[in-house]
Amino acid sequence: MLEKMIFGRYVPGNSFVHRLDPRSKLLFVFLFIVAVFLANNTATYALLLAFTLLVISIARIRLYFLFNGLKPILFLIIFTLLMHFIFTKEGALLIDWKFLKIYEEGVRQGIYISIRFLVLVLMTTILTLTTSPISITDGMETLLNPLKRFKLPVHELALMMSISLRFIPTLMDETDKILKAQLARGSDLTSGTVKERIRAVVPLLVPLFVSAFKRAEDLAIAMEVRGYRGGEGRTRYRQLDWQWRDTVVIILFLVLVVALFWLRGGN
Amino acid sequence: MKEILSLDHVSYSYESEDGVTRRAVDDVNFTVNDGEWIAIVGHNGSGKSTLAKLMIGLLFPEQGKVKVFLEELNADNLWEIRSDIGIVFQNPDNQFVGSTVQDDVAFALENNGIPFEEMVPRVHESLAQVNMEGFLDHEPHHLSGGQKQRVAIAGALAMRPKLLILDEATSMLDPQGRDEVIQVVDELKRTTGLTVISITHDLEEVLLADRVIVMNDGKLLLTGKPEEIFAHGDKLESIGLDLPFAARLSRSLRQAGVGIQGEHMTEEELVNELWTSHFNK
Ligand SMILES: Nc1ncnc2c1ncn2[C@@H]1O[C@H](COP(=O)(O)OP(=O)(O)OP(=O)(O)O)[C@@H](O)[C@H]1O
Ligand SMILES: [Mg+2]
């Protein structure tokens, strides 16, 4: 069930999109999210949708894989669409069948909003599918670097994030081990009332927390003896490399914005 | 012989929550020379890890002096001295900082401000020294314990340390992982003349050492060559330490009246003694 969910997952690959610098991808997705709100008519929404599909094909992500993985979110989108169909009562009446009255404006609004939602979800999913979490962290750290002047602890935040990412699999394994150990002692997480089940989680969480604190302490010592004293005077092993293709991405974005302004309905 | 590290009447106590102070290290003296391999043994809680922490300035002695590279450790020279000491701890998972093998090896280099152009060859070189050069981009959870510990050693080697401390670095590994790590350290010592202090429960590891230090309840009980130490069989057993199998067998045979001479550390020594013992009569 969880394996199929691809929102936020990374799948290594070697496409044009995979090889982009995380900074250009992050910048692009962030600006794209803003630009989506420029769309206000059929032509602009169609353009956004077409553009997104183009990016998917460049990233060599199979549509079936993508939509299958996003099923729960697609349900949400379809639900929004239906709500608009049923409850918006403006424009010409299209269908009038017993209780059900569907108006032209409802259909239009529903479709627009669904497309907006869909392209946002798709773009961010493409970002995480094609960029390793650690690259995203690196990109964020560099992009947010100017904010250091306003006392934002950019380096510390990035380090926290990379260490958390590094420890997720370790703690997952640990949870699994503790779960099995508690099951072997007769703890039952799968039956009983909600209250009983919540109570059964406690013996799972307590050892997990204890061990996580122990790990944190060990890690802090290991970092200190290897000379970690904060971001000051540190060099970086992971180098980001802005290439021609990253400039292309930014130009492509500008072209998209110009096209959106040009196709936009005036109001 | 050049001195690398010395402890001069060093003591340290921990204060527990209920206000009781416990001497974890009590008036300990010893000197480690350049190129030596020292093994420190002792029962659980005998103060071995506390010693390691004193050596690398995670703790400062209550009494006495800790000198590293002939300088007394203090808050001013702490970071500089640390950059010349590598230390590897027990738990392979809890000392892996980077998200991949190469990031982890580079961590100390980054902290010490080594420029990027120099980091790349150093990372590759250190990984080659521990036979892990094929694992640059591997993530920690896809590595075995022994591999993680070898990466941790590479991370220490990247700073080109003069002294490597292993605090039970092999105790959480399976026999194969343990052999891998010991082999790597042995090889390093022979090829680069690295000084090694290894805190261990593993008797094979003790036999590789030039000198053994036995700790008991915070005090230094015995020090000497491995064969000298294992000659004190009863004393070791009385403080809860094991003897190597060959040494135990040799002792039992002698006690049973089999005419063999001296102590035997390894099976080979014992076998040689046994099959030649008749000629010597
Ligand atoms: N942070 C601490 N606070 C209080 N007491 C401590 C602390 N760390 C260690 N001790 C105590 O100091 C003594 C020596 O501990 P140390 O960890 O040095 O022993 P060790 O020889 O490394 O043991 P082991 O073989 O179990 O690793 C023990 O009695 C221990 O309970
Ligand atoms: Mg210890």
Image (cartoon, coloured by chain):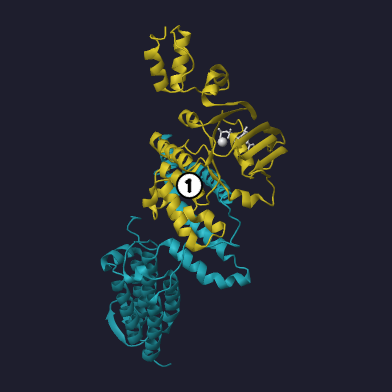
Left or right side of A61 for B259: right
Category of crowding for the residue at label 1, using alpha-carbon neighbours closer than 10 angstroms: few (below 14), some (14–19), many (at least 20): many
The tint of chain A in the picture is cyan
Residue A257 in the image: state x and y as whole percent: 40, 85
Question: Does the rendering let one see residue A198?
Answer: no
Secondary element under disc 1, as helix, strand or loop, is helix
Snapshot quadrant of residue A96 = bottom left
Whether residue B14 sits left or right of residue A15 in the image: it is: right
Which quarter of the figure has residue A153? bottom right
Q: In x, y percent, where is residue A49? A: 32, 78
Q: As rendered, which of B11 and B195 lies closer to the eye?
A: B195
Which residue sits furthest bottom?
A: A266
Subunit under mark 1 = B
Q: Is residue A224 above or below residue B257?
A: below
Disc 1 marks a residue whose amino acid type is Ala
Give the percent coordinates (x, y) of residue A54. 30, 76
User: Which chain does the yellow colour mark?
Assistant: B
Relative depth, front residue between B269 and B180: B269
Taking the image as shown, residue B35 lies to the left or right of residue B139, namely: right
Name the quarter where the N terminus of chain B is drawn: top right
Residue bearing mark 1: B152
Q: Residue at x 42, y 42 (%)?
A: B145
Name the foreground residue: B174 vs B178. B178
**Relative horizontal placement of residue A232, taking residue A29 as reference (left or right):** right
Q: As displayed, is residue B214 above or below residue A108?
A: above
Which quadrant of the frame does ligand 1 lie within?
A: top right
- The quarter of the image holding the C terminus of chain B is top left
Residue placed at 40% from the left, 81% from the top?
A253
Q: Nearer the viewer, residue B276 or A35?
A: B276
Residue B238, position in %: x, y?
A: 57, 19
